[in-house]
Image: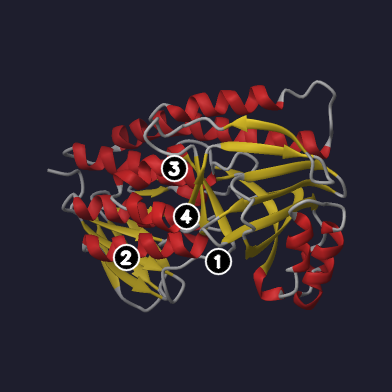
Amino acid sequence: MAAVGNVLIVGGGTAGSALAILLARGGVAVDVAELKPELTALGSGITLQGNALRVLRDLGVWDRVAAAGFAFGSLGIRTPDGRLVAEIPDARTGGADLPATLGMNRPELAAILADAVRESGARIGLGLTVETLTDTGDGVRARLSDGTAGTYDLVVGADGIRSKVRGLIGVEAAPRPTGMGIWRIHTRRPEDVERTDLVYGGPCFIAGYCPTSEDSMYAYLVERARPRESVADADKPARMRALAEGYGGAWDGIRADITDPDRINYTWFESLLVDRPWNRGRVVLIGDAAHACPPTLAQGAAQCLEDAAVLAELLLAADRLDQALFDAFMDRRYERVKAVVEASLQLADWQLNPVPDADVPGLMGRIAAMVTQRP
């Protein structure tokens, strides 16, 4: 018998959806409260490393993800004019039977997970969030934004980097900007783009792209953060094109396609790490509500998925919910997540404040070796 009979998950993103699928399939009654009017995601594309693919396989959605995305096994390093200077094999962090890396359109991943949530039998409430939480010791009374209320054995805050649940349980941690901003565009994939290629140098810290399907990819430019209010929608194409002028090769075609502001996204890199424990009584945080980092290691989604997998495993294997279970969750997650966040921030800092002896390959290799092991 599972440690919980019913669970409220606040947030239907990657972490919340994965947890809902696993718990509902294990016989737990699951309610998902999602603030948006549908289970979807904004953004252009997402890069998923092997350890993320491993969890998606455990969720039973790998075949759909593989069909929708674009798999590859190496990383290219190029000069600003487009010349290839290095081709580096990617670590297969999910095991030899999964690709090293897969790119896909972020909304398509969200749609696949949303279908799996519905198939699992979890109940989804859209346009909803939680307003109050009262922990009674043997349950949590939750009042939702539509005025309804219910009592749950466990409430999970999977509501993102600006988590409302985090505030409701008195966790004061808040995201911090890293000093970098990123321009992203969803665009067409030329036939010769078959993996992620990165350029370090030129007018930006990083210029890169990642194929996301047979006919699409997303491209990005990372620069020093500019005030968000200075980036008007109408100006996005001209600003991104101007930055892209410093790059050749595939960027010649990408630059010509930077015309539609609706396909361009500009955000800051931010970081967050909530100290352990991530729970207060019977309310626990997972995913971006507990940790977030710049995408310099492409581990954000993977760590969210791992949170869900580990918490579900513990809840389904135990016969009671107590602090010992949450401590076991932290023992398997905290140091691993902390290492990823700190390494991601270190890579960003080496871009912002270059040092001559920065061991980028060594740092990336250590993280790859760590995440290859199941959490």
> Relative to residue 327, is residue 122 drawn left or right?
left
Color scheme of the displayed model: secondary structure
Per the model, the C-alpha gap separating discs 3 and 4 is: 13 Å
Per the model, the C-alpha gap separating discs 1 and 2 is: 17 Å
Amino acid at the residue labelled 1: Leu
Residue at 78% of width from left, 51% of height from top? 249
Asked whether residue 139 appears in the rendered view, the answer is: yes
Amino acid at the residue labelled 4: Gly
Q: Which mark is residue 246?
A: none
Q: Nearer the viewer, mark 3 or mark 4?
A: 4
Per the model, the C-alpha gap separating discs 4 and 2 is: 17 Å
Task: Describe the element under mark 4 as helix, strand or loop.
Answer: loop
Q: Which residue is mark 3?
A: 52
Instruction: Please state, as top left, top right, bottom left or bottom right, where the C terminus lies in the image.
Output: top left
Amino acid at the residue labelled 2: Asp
Q: Which residue is mark 2?
A: 115
Residue at 75% of width from left, 74% of height from top? 259
Of the two numbered discs 2 and 3 on the same chain, state the one appearing first in sequence. Answer: 3
Q: Which residue is mark 4?
A: 69
> Relative to residue 159, is residue 162 drawn left or right?
right
Q: Which sits in the foreground, 330 or 362?
A: 362
Of the two numbered discs 1 and 2 on the same chain, state the one appearing first in sequence. Answer: 1
Instruction: Please state, as top left, top right, bottom left or bottom right, where the N terminus lies in the image.
Output: top left
Q: Which mark is residue 42?
A: 1
Which quadrant of the figure has residue 261? bottom right
Per the model, the C-alpha gap separating discs 1 and 4 is: 17 Å
State whether residue 130 is above or below residue 365. below
Amino acid at the residue labelled 3: Ala
> What is the crowding at mark 1: few (fewer than 14 residues within 10 Å), some, or many (at least 20)?
few
Residue at 35% of width from left, 56% of height from top? 64
Task: Describe the element under mark 1 as helix, strand or loop.
Answer: loop
